[in-house]
Image: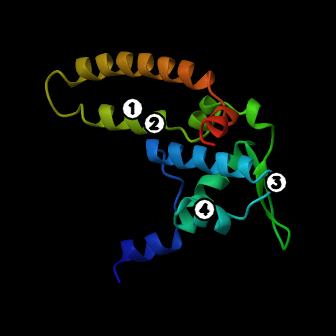
Amino acid sequence: MSIQKAADKKAPMACPSTYKTFSLAVQALVALERHSGKCSSGDLASYLHLESTLIRRILKTLAQENLIESREGRDGGYRLKKDAQQITLAEVYTALQVHSSLSDSMLDATAGHCFADQIKESFSDILSEIEENTLSVLRSRTIADIVERSV
């Protein structure tokens, strides 16, 4: 086994910051609200047809950002930390740092040519505007809104 593969096996994987992760996190929060109480990560993984490792990473991030709380043990599980009406999609998006995915991808691709700095500056301006508009829309939607529309 290579050194890199061994290191990959030992190091815990961080929650990937992608739009897919954002979608999965919102779905997990909707599932928690629908179950009006607590759910284990295994139940959520089964409910959402996901790998339990992935959902646990997402739940860990949401717990660290105080959107949910977790309890260990026999009666353990996850539950929303506040009312679904009070959790905006902007909070979830920000907690997962989804904006980094788009920003990093665009800015990383602007290297190695004579006008890279100018392109990077232009992209930075565009990315700031995208971020402002995205957050504006996401602030106007809550987990309760998604629950209501998905009944």
Q: Which of 137 and 8 is in front in this view?
A: 137
Q: Is mark 2 on a helix, strand or loop?
A: helix
Quarter of the image with the N terminus in it: bottom left
Farthest residue, direction front: 151
Q: Provide the residue designation for mark 3.
A: 37
Callout 2, which amino acid?
Answer: Ser
Q: Nearer the viewer, residue 30 or 22?
A: 30
Q: Provide the residue designation for mark 1.
A: 103
Q: Is mark 4 on a helix, strand or loop?
A: helix
Q: Provide the residue designation for mark 4.
A: 47
Q: Which of marks 1 and 3 is in front?
A: 3
C-beta proximity under 8 Å, tags 3 and 4 = no
Callout 3, which amino acid?
Answer: Gly
C-beta proximity under 8 Å, tags 3 and 2 = no
Q: Earlier in the sequence, mark 4 or mark 1?
A: 4
Mark 4 vs mark 2, CA separation in Å: 28 Å
